[in-house]
Image (cartoon, grey):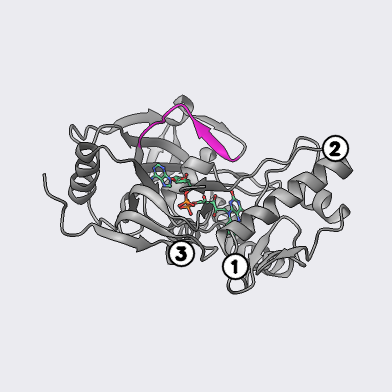
Amino acid sequence: MSRPAFIEENRSLASFTSWLVGGPADYFCLPSNEKEIQQAWSWALQKQIPVIFLGGGTNVLISDKGVEGLVIGLKNFSGVSGESVVEQDGKKILRFAALAGTSKMELLKIFLKHKLAPALFLAGLPGDVGGGVVMNAGVAEALSPREFGEIVHSIEVVKDPVAWQPQVFADDEVQWTYRHSRGWQPGLVTRVHFSWPYEVDADVLVKVREANRVRFSKQPLDKPSCGSVFVNPVGHKAAQLIDRCGLKGFQIGDAQVSLKHANFIVNLGQARAAEISQVIEHVKRTVQDKEAVELQTEVVRLGRW
Ligand SMILES: Cc1cc2nc3c(=O)[nH]c(=O)nc-3n(C[C@H](O)[C@H](O)[C@H](O)COP(=O)(O)OP(=O)(O)OC[C@H]3O[C@@H](n4cnc5c(N)ncnc54)[C@H](O)[C@@H]3O)c2cc1C
């Protein structure tokens, strides 16, 4: 099987990540439909090279040395279908499905249109639907809902590109934990089905605007980052621990612990992934030494480290 024409060789991935760092993928493609994903993935399987999926790239740190194998970018594999309000046990429910590369912004628009509560937590979340499932993306605030797992009805996962028989996992078959989902891997999340009670909140837009105002005031959203780098250890807030260690502003090259939010590491312009990685290690060591707490990264490292 020859390489499909839409697969590029040696393609820089920096512009496909929110940190704007990272070297090239050996092979890269941006398929827009199942057939292209199937072709690309099957080709890699036959060539016996690794396959890595990339959503919005808002939670990954890609090595400067690049990524071995084929990276399949999903952002063009997007679209919403089946939007409907159905009756179940005498209650109205909003249902729809979205392909993995659909941006969370599109979900936000749908919930806003219907004036439903999930709009509130989605307003702060970048990236795509597939990445949202993988990371069980959510917010720390006491909202309902506050995590992806709460709005998912089921997910479709393809495990074998040749057979292409999506396996359906109902929401209660997936283990939704803090910034992770388990029980469906390995595979590609292709489509996500959403469902939420149709309980209209007339003020939802006002609340979303206020949440955005607060977020802009607290987070360095004017600089490239991946959001929170570390998960909150049980009983602690990672940002408070880092702040207490005096690490705000700590910098290696152009990678800096944000002055605005200590759990963000920002790219001041020309940061390299290695510098971000060194800042991460320094923060972990310092918090361990001074606060006796082990920080774990939320961000996923990809590539040749
Ligand atoms: C400014 C900013 C603010 C943020 N705030 C928050 C926040 O408040 N809460 C929060 O939870 N997160 C936050 N994040 C992190 C990030 O947006 C989320 O984790 C998001 O859900 C990641 O989605 P993505 O599409 O970008 O995933 P990616 O970063 O592209 O991928 C994440 C992982 O999922 C895998 N993956 C992606 N798509 C698929 C798929 N379809 N099938 C199988 N594997 C796949 C990738 O290989 C990778 O391992 C923030 C990020 C930024 C930049």
Residue assigned mark 3: 14
Residue type indicated by callout 3: Ala
Q: Please provide the residue range marked out in magenta.
A: 179-187
Q: CA distance from mark 3 to mark 2?
A: 34 Å
Residue assigned mark 2: 292
Do labels 1 and 3 touch, CB within 8 Å?
no
Magenta stretch: includes residue 112: no
Residue 202: tell me if it is visible: no
Residue assigned mark 1: 271
Residue type indicated by callout 1: Ala
What residue is drawn where x is 77% and y is 52%?
Answer: 239
The 10 Å Cα crowd at callout 3, few under 14, some 14 to 19, many 20 or more, is many
Secondary structure of the residue carrying numbered label 3: helix
Secondary structure of the residue carrying numbered label 2: loop
Q: Earlier in the sequence, mark 3 or mark 2?
A: 3
The picture places residue 158, in percent across and down from the top left corner, at 29, 35
The 10 Å Cα crowd at callout 2, few under 14, some 14 to 19, many 20 or more, is few
Quadrant (top left/top right/bottom left/bottom right) for the N terminus: top left
Do labels 1 and 2 touch, CB within 8 Å?
no
Residue type indicated by callout 2: Ala
